[in-house]
Amino acid sequence: MAIPGNLLAAATSTMDPSYVGWRVRSNATLVSGTGGRVGPRCLGVKSTAAAGAEAETVSFYPVTAGQTYFMFADAGGSVVERIGIEWLDSKAVPVGAVTWSLWTMSAMAGWHRVSVAGVAPVGATRARLVLASAQTTAGVSHFWENVYFGGVIRTLGNLLPWSVEATEIDASGWTAEVNATVSRQVPAMSWPVDAYTAGGHTLAMTATAAGNAAVRTVIRPAVTPGTEYMAYAYLQPPVLTATAWIELRWHDAAGNQIGAQRSVLAAPGTGMYRQRASAVAPAGAASCSVAAGLDGAGAGQVLRLETVVVTAAPALAPDSVIRQDAATFEQGTGGWTVSSGTATLARSTPWGAAALEGSYALTATSPSATASTLRSPRVPVTEGVNWRLTTGARATTGTTTSLWLRVRWYDSTGTSIGLSTGTGYAFANTGWYWMSTDAVAPAGAVEAAVELTVTASASASVLHVDGVSLRQVLPLTEVSVTEERGFATVTLRELILGYTLTVERETPDAKRAPVRGASGLIVDQPITRELVVAEDHEIPMGVPVRYRITMTSPSGARSTRSTPLVTVSLPDRNEVWLKDPGNPQRACRVMVQRAPDWQRPIEQAVHRVRGRRNPVVLSGRRGGMEGDLDIWTRTDEEREALHLLLDSGNVLLWQAMPGMGVADMYVQVAEVTEARTGGTAAEPWRSWSLPLTEVDQPVALGVNGSGGRTWQDVITEFATCADVLAAYATSEDLLLDRRRG
């Protein structure tokens, strides 16, 4: 899959089917290598003498002075490497020095990530990309693939700016707090091919002497008291026995620290491991910061950090009321207790040894074959509502374990007012199991606690619990309409991860058509989330429609759902919708002046035979509709919206109400005529003639959406509105993060 936002052509990025986008810069010959990550091919840069070898892009890429650009590539070979961005003016003359990454700290034959970022200098309008490797003998090849160049790729929702998250430009977003120095390093390390926010430069904290060492962020983003937040980063400890940690800190309006939540890494080795810390912002909290460090560090020991994020903590399951620390056990036992029995609780160890969500699980050890009840912290609930408790569990020793899932209810005084009947499960130590139970909160219930009663079949039995959620039971499928924008919204809950999903629109004549999603028509798409919301902007007008949802297991078994009938109408039958299926935000509702007089062209060859009255005619297949649609725009806003819709030249969808003599039609619009309707110069009405040609529905086209981008991301990235205006030409570009240049 192409890297989102990449200015490089697919062949230049992946080297497939060849490396035509690259040329020799110095001391090299180029070869097409095998064993690529994205496709079968990669670029080999072979040294021709005992010196470093460099390759560069054949093309230049447009840049805007003052904006930050990011480049990364995956590399492999027997020597160290670096990459660079060469800034050029409009005449392709270099502007200033090449912005180079640091050299990798060691060579690595396997694929690893190298990256660099820089601000385009004054006078720069173009950029050329450079790949460099430090060969010391002739005939040594270095391999490259998966190259990206474009805007920065940041974690959506991160309250920290990208300069702090990635440290690709410098380490100025961090400061030493105690017994440490701050720098950057590029360890040679493998990352998944699509881990676009990780790899390359890391923050390096070096202990200056033996003892505790710590660093912290300089920037303190604003927080809201009572909201749960999560901080996480990849940590690389210097040795297996090191005590490495990350800490989420709270500060009041005066900058005083008023609280902190530390999460200690139980490292299984000396690689990169993502560690989380989560907590609810206390009363009086105005901002937060992130710290990391080593306890009992040796002089010169280095702790590396990668991809540092602070964000509002996502619920483990949609609308779950259980906090992250009590649901995923990333920083401890999450406040769980043993309300009865002899079991003991601990966080699993080491990192990654036991987990369903994240990297740790709650570990309950039973010293004897008896029952113990594990209880979660209390959470707020609403009386009279049906709640669903879901958890994953795994028995690691013993033959069979019995587990009862229940919910205990509490009133406003904190007194227990009942325990749900619950559901029991028995399972062997063969892996993880998902289990659930439903219960209605009784009258007077304002709080609840999850209770898990485990009965071990043997002494020293161990049970792992992870992924605990308690959420209000909502409909599996919901549908609503937004008539003023001409679309329907389908909400799907409790989808099965690992299955594939198909969403179809069904009309009263039993015809079905797939609904369009972010990656094209939703037909056998992999399910990666329990909750999916799809907006159907191609729903026909004035026709009752239901949606059929099909989930297919890897073995081919199918389950289906359907929604009630819904109808989206046009308030005025003289109006029609013109929509861009891939950009529904551009949809226009306009008034029809005159419907087309249709033509259906056909290719024919007429052969007149001498001596015969009638010719021989050879015909092709008759084409689709062609004709001119005459419409009015009634306001300046409608006129500007129609221009925006037509500017792209994309395939459009024309929709009218039933009974108007035309079915929904996908069209291409040729040369457009916009005319005044008479009257004064201030008259806003315009008469348009749109030459239409009927075309097929675009199948692979996905809905171009924001992908989770919010105003918080804009606030984090830009200091002033003037900075936003300088970066984006239109509000649509702001929504989709399409920056100038």
Image (cartoon, grey):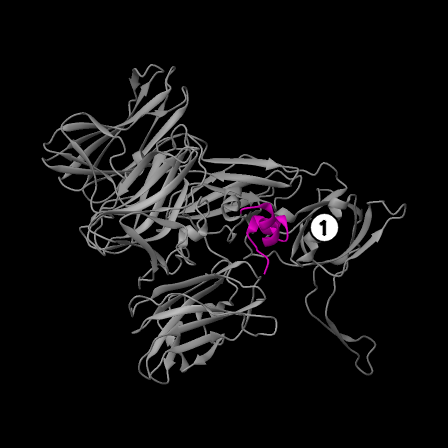
Q: What is the three-letter code of the residue carrying label 1?
A: Leu
Q: Residue at x 28, y 41 (%)?
A: 263
Left or right of residue 327: residue 157: right
Q: Residue at x 90, y 45 (%)?
A: 679
Q: Is residue 726 magenta?
A: yes
Nearest the camera: 662 or 276? Answer: 276
> What kind of element bears circle 1?
helix
Q: Which residues are magenta?
A: 719-741
Q: Residue at x 43, y 46 (%)?
A: 160
Q: Which quadrant of the rendered structure holds the C terminus?
A: bottom right
Q: Position of residue 532 (x, y in %)?
A: 47, 42
Q: Residue at x 32, y 80 (%)?
A: 140
Q: Mark 1 highlights which residue?
A: 642
Q: Residues within 10 Å of mark 1 (few under 14, many from 20)?
A: some
Nearest the camera: 71 or 374? Answer: 71
The answer to which quarter of the image holds residue 507 is top right
